[in-house]
Amino acid sequence: MEDEGLENIDPNKSYVIVANHNTFFDIPMTHLLPLNFRWVSKREVLMFPIFGWVLFIQRSLTIKRGSASSAKEMMSKGAKLLNNDVSVAIFPEGTRSRDGKVGEFKPGAFLMAKSAGVEILPVVLYGSRKAIIGNRGIVKLKVKVLSPISFEGKKVGEVTKDLNKQYIEQLDGASQQ
């Protein structure tokens, strides 16, 4: 597995980490990051053998899809973690990509970062879909950390849309190679 951009991480800061999501491989791939962090996951994932157990043991945050009170509780717990020097990782698409294309980012991760006064740490994950669906030859897995994004002078919607576009460009460029 290859990594790029780890120098963009300040280990003395907490971030809201956003990553694209294709397969369950994405979760262990992010553990290359030299940060103490917790995941935000749909509650049902806790029932999956091994992955769910690990998320439970790590005290990751869970959310019940479609529940406003669950989302509010998750945002509150996330803010507490961020204020205690623990980063929070979220897949802003809300679910895995079914076709390998980046989906529309939901604003939750960005709202959490802005309200907690922390930066977004964009992490682009490459290769996990090819590893799952099969590929002749060796599959190269890569974790690329982009420069952190501050909300200073920016609106949540603007940052969400701009970063979504940046992920699409990053991953479309990679598929052309």
Image (cartoon, rainbow, N blue to C red):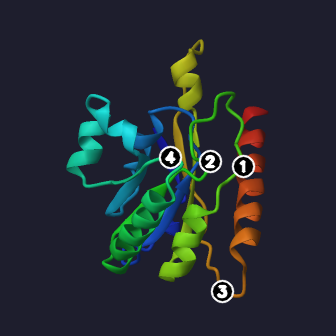
Q: Which residue is mark 3?
A: 152
Residue 156: which quarter of the image? bottom right
**Distance of mark 2 from mark 1, alpha carbons?**
6 Å
> In the rendering, at what x and y percent does residue 15 appear?
46, 70
Q: Which residue is mark 1?
A: 104
Instruction: Give the residue displayed 60% in from the left and 61% down from the top.
Output: 146
- N-terminal-most mark, 2 or 3: 2
> The N terminus lies in which quarter of the figure?
top left
**Distance of mark 2 from mark 3, alpha carbons?**
23 Å
> In the rendering, at what x and y percent does residue 89 appear?
45, 57
Q: Which residue is mark 4?
A: 65
On the rendered structure, is 129 left or right of 159?
left
- N-terminal-most mark, 3 or 4: 4
Q: What element does badge 2 sit on?
A: loop
Labelled disc at residue 93: 2
Viewer-nearest of discs 3 and 1: 1
On the rendered structure, is 54 left or right of 164?
left
Task: Tell me the kind of residue under disc 4.
Answer: Arg
> In the rendering, at what x and y percent does residue 140 appear?
54, 31
Viewer-nearest of discs 1 and 4: 4
Task: Tell me the kind of residue under disc 2.
Answer: Glu
- N-terminal-most mark, 3 or 1: 1
Is the C-beta separation of discs 3 and 4 under 8 Å?
no
